[in-house]
Amino acid sequence: MKRRDFVKGIVLASGIVGITPFIPAGKFLVTTFSFKYVRQKIANVNDIPPNNRLLFTYPKTGDIEQDSDPFRKFLLIRLPNGEFKAYSAVCLHLWCIIDYKPDKVDIECPCHGSTYNAQTGVAFKGPASKQFNKTLPEVKLEIDDNGDIYANGVIGVIGYGREGA
Ligand code: FES
């Protein structure tokens, strides 16, 4: 049995699907379940105008190599109505990095066209929308009186998803 198939077998057995050439599967198994999502300042409301987004690292360690891990990358989105949302930047299909598109007010994957609702994080188009888990992991956000935005936990599993529509 090839190593890749072995890893895929482990992942399938655990209910996790979506092994991909874009991010090594071993990395998923090692890192995703070891992150500690402590409260972390990620931006101020003045850093991001409505209908825009910011890519941030969470949890951030200060180590360049660790912080470059795609599984630590999240999109902080300020919707046109001013509301803030934050999702994992890892596509649920084959783990490419997704991005917010202000002109369409959605989140799109450049690899195979999966498209996510920016309000809910639910995939509604492309291969991710046909998966059992089609809702992006979401960051719990807090905004203090100074307008500082904090990440304080993640709902779901990076690269796998969370319960949703
Ligand atoms: S990796 Fe295939 S649609 Fe995102």
Image: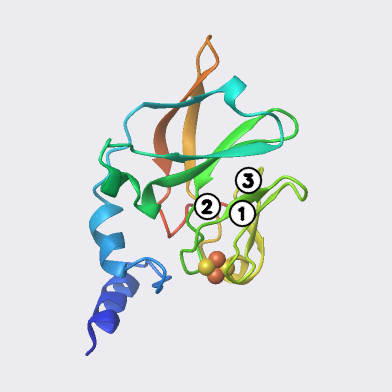
Against 13, residue 156 (above or below) is above
Q: Are marks 3 and 1 in contact (CB under 8 Å)?
A: yes
- Disc 1 designates what residue? 122
The numbered mark, 2 or 1, whose residue comes first in the sequence reads: 1
Q: CA distance from mark 3 to mark 1?
A: 5 Å
Asked which quadrant contains residue 129, the reply is bottom right
Mark 3 crowdedness (10 Å alpha carbons): few <14, some 14-19, many ≥20: some
Q: Secondary structure at mark 2?
A: loop
**Amino acid type shown at disc 2:** Leu
Q: Secondary structure at mark 1?
A: loop
Say which mark, if any, is on residue 136. 2
Ligand 1's quadrant is bottom right
- Percent position of residue 33, x then y: 27, 51
Q: Residue at x 66, y 37 (%)?
A: 52
- Percent position of residue 156, x then y: 43, 49
- Disc 3 designates what residue? 120
Mark 1 crowdedness (10 Å alpha carbons): few <14, some 14-19, many ≥20: many
Q: CA distance from mark 2 to mark 1?
A: 6 Å
Farthest right residue?
103
Asked which quadrant contains residue 70, the reply is bottom left
Which quarter of the image is occupied by the N terminus? bottom left
Report the front residue among 48 and 161.
Answer: 48
Q: Are marks 2 and 1 in contact (CB under 8 Å)?
A: yes
Which quarter of the image is occupied by the C terminus? bottom right
- Percent position of residue 54, x then y: 55, 38
The numbered mark, 3 or 2, whose residue comes first in the sequence reads: 3
Against 42, residue 32 (above or below) is below
Farthest bottom residue?
1
